[in-house]
Image: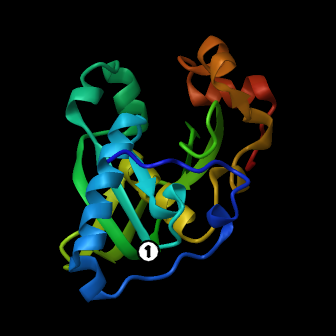
Amino acid sequence: MRLKIVQAGDPVLRRMARPLKPDEIRGPDIQRLIQDMRETMHDAPGVGLAAPQVGLSLQLAVIEDREEVLRDLPPELLAERDRKPVQFHAIINPVIRAQSAESVDFFEGCLSVVGFVALVPRARSLTVECFDEHGQARTIKATGWYARILQHEIDHLHGGLYLDRMCRRSFAGVDNFNRYWKDQPITKVRADLGIKGGC
């Protein structure tokens, strides 16, 4: 079942979400929610979706970066973003245990901030401990685009949006992003927008 995605301004997006207990994770309600969130994420389309985005203040997000989507993207774009397919999985009660000091800027959008994107600095790599959709403890070591997705979704579970971390000068409507910045190297985008150092 496709769920309604709430938009920026809804208080649920700014609350610290509630952790789930192991018996809840394996129960029929959460299992159904995971499948509904997967369907909603695919339909949107997106590569991640957190429970607060569908109005539920729970520490649960689903992630999938499908191979068939990546096939249509230029190889140089995939290489620049260090983007590879990620199989479907859920992250529940995630905790970032380590992350690289090195950060990387790329444009991000959000299904709860429709129509806009901005450059967001994120750690290049990180280690996350969580439970998966089966209630099993899992340690994830991620780099590149996958690390970015994890950080974006974990922010949602802590009441954050990419707007809180973005390079403000880069904030753009999707139409203007596609017109001016989509195919530009990030170094050129930063130079053209006068972004020096951090954001």
Image coordinates of residue 157 in percent, x first then y, are 52, 68
Q: Residue at x 48, y 59 (%)?
A: 153
Q: Is residue 94 above or below residue 70?
A: below
Q: Residue at x 61, y 36 (%)?
A: 114
Lateral position of residue 31 relative to residue 61, left or right: left
Instruction: Identify the residue at image location x=73%, y=34%.
Output: 170
> Is the image coloured rainbow, by chain, by secondary structure, or in one colour?
rainbow
- Up the image or down, 91 lies above or below 74; here it is below
Frontmost residue, 186 versus 43: 43
Residue nearest the observer in this picture, 130 or 26:
26
Determine if residue 101 is in view. no
Image location of residue 128, percent across then percent down? 37, 72
Residue type at mark 1 is Ala
- For residue 105, what is the image quadrant? top right
**Percent x, y for residue 16?**
60, 76
The percent position of residue 176, horizontal first and vertical second, equals 69, 17
- Residue at the image point whose x is 80% and y is 36% from the top: 169
- Label 1, secondary structure: give it: strand
* Residue 68 appears in the picture as rendered: yes
Relative to 45, is 101 above or below?
Answer: below
Residue density around tag 1, few if under 14, some if 14–19, many if 20 or more, within 10 Å: few
Q: Nearer the viewer, residue 66 or 21?
A: 21
- In front of the other: 54 or 131: 54
Q: Which residue is mark 1?
A: 98
Q: Quadrant of residue 2?
A: top left
